[in-house]
Amino acid sequence: MKKYIKILLSILLTLGLILITMSFIIENIVVKTFSQEILSKKISGYFLDEIIYDVDTNTLEKIEYNIRNSKYTSKITSKFIKTITKNVAYNENINFDISKEIDLLISENMPKNLYNDKVNSTKEYLNEKIVNTEKTLEENLVYSFGDYYITILKLYNILTNTYFRIVMLLTFIISIIGLVMMEKYKSLKVIQISSLITAIITGIVFVAIKLLSNFIDQRLAGGWLSNINLRLMITFIIIEFIISLVLFIVIKKLKFDNNDKN
């Protein structure tokens, strides 16, 4: 019985680690890629429309760079994607409110000599344009890509849902606790193997995305993507391999010390 419980806990630990890793990676890929390839260009373009005749070229280039790499642009993108996912996949009517993010984006990037004169008009213009972009994409999404896109959006929503992450994290933690109680330090071997399996699966997904990047661009993104942002995935793969290696060394050290004592 103990053997079967150990196998079950090992499977749950590995599954929980894989799913929670994929949850954060998938959301990061979608948000970062959509932001850098599409929305940040539109936001910076709308912003520059309002000040293009009031500042020099060097200042415009600097502002464009700052907006495209701003954390507020990423937050707008995240809200953009969440709103579209809920409204299209589940036929909801969530209001796309980004007024706070736009306020912060403007205060961060508006030249001080133009701030008082341009802030309100830029705020209204940005909000109107970005909200209209969201509505247009929302209306055309299923029409352009077909009903299968709804399934993709629902799957994305489930995988990136906060409750899903909590369940997977609890599964992971409870499995570790159970294994430690049953196996003591030997449970490190299971954790090491789980980390290695997660690293390998993440690596396989990385290669698959690279090989299918053109298909993803044409079938899922309408040909808008020139590059898919996989930086976080690479970071996760490296971290997972390092954890697995460190645990492997620790296990060998514990075995050596144990044999030495015997």
Image (tube, rainbow, N blue to C red):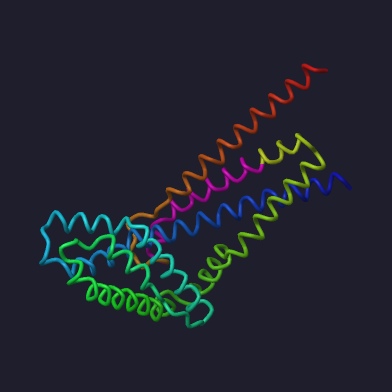
Relative to the observer, which residue lies in front, 128 or 251?
A: 128
Magenta stretch, residue numbers? 194-219
In the image, residue 69 sits, relative to residue 196, either above or below, namely below
In the image, residue 238 sits, relative to residue 95, either above or below, namely above
Count of picture labels: 0
Residue 181: percent from the left, percent from the top?
80, 42
Single out the residue that lies furthest toward the right.
1
Relative to the observer, which residue lies in front, 62 or 249?
A: 62
Q: Residue at x 51, y 73 (%)?
A: 148
Residue 6: percent from the left, percent from the top?
80, 45
Q: Residue at x 12, y 61 (%)?
A: 55
Instruction: Examine the structure image and report whether residue 202 is included in the region drawn in magenta.
Output: yes
Specify the principal SS of the magenta part. Answer: helix
Relative to the observer, which residue lies in front, 228 or 21?
A: 21
Left/right placement of residue 104 relative to residue 83 reads left
Left/right placement of residue 35 relative to residue 198 reads left
Left/right placement of residue 117 relative to residue 139 reads left
Q: Residue at x 41, y 78 (%)?
A: 138
Q: Residue 248 appears in which quarter of the rendering?
A: top right
Residue 17: percent from the left, percent from the top?
63, 50
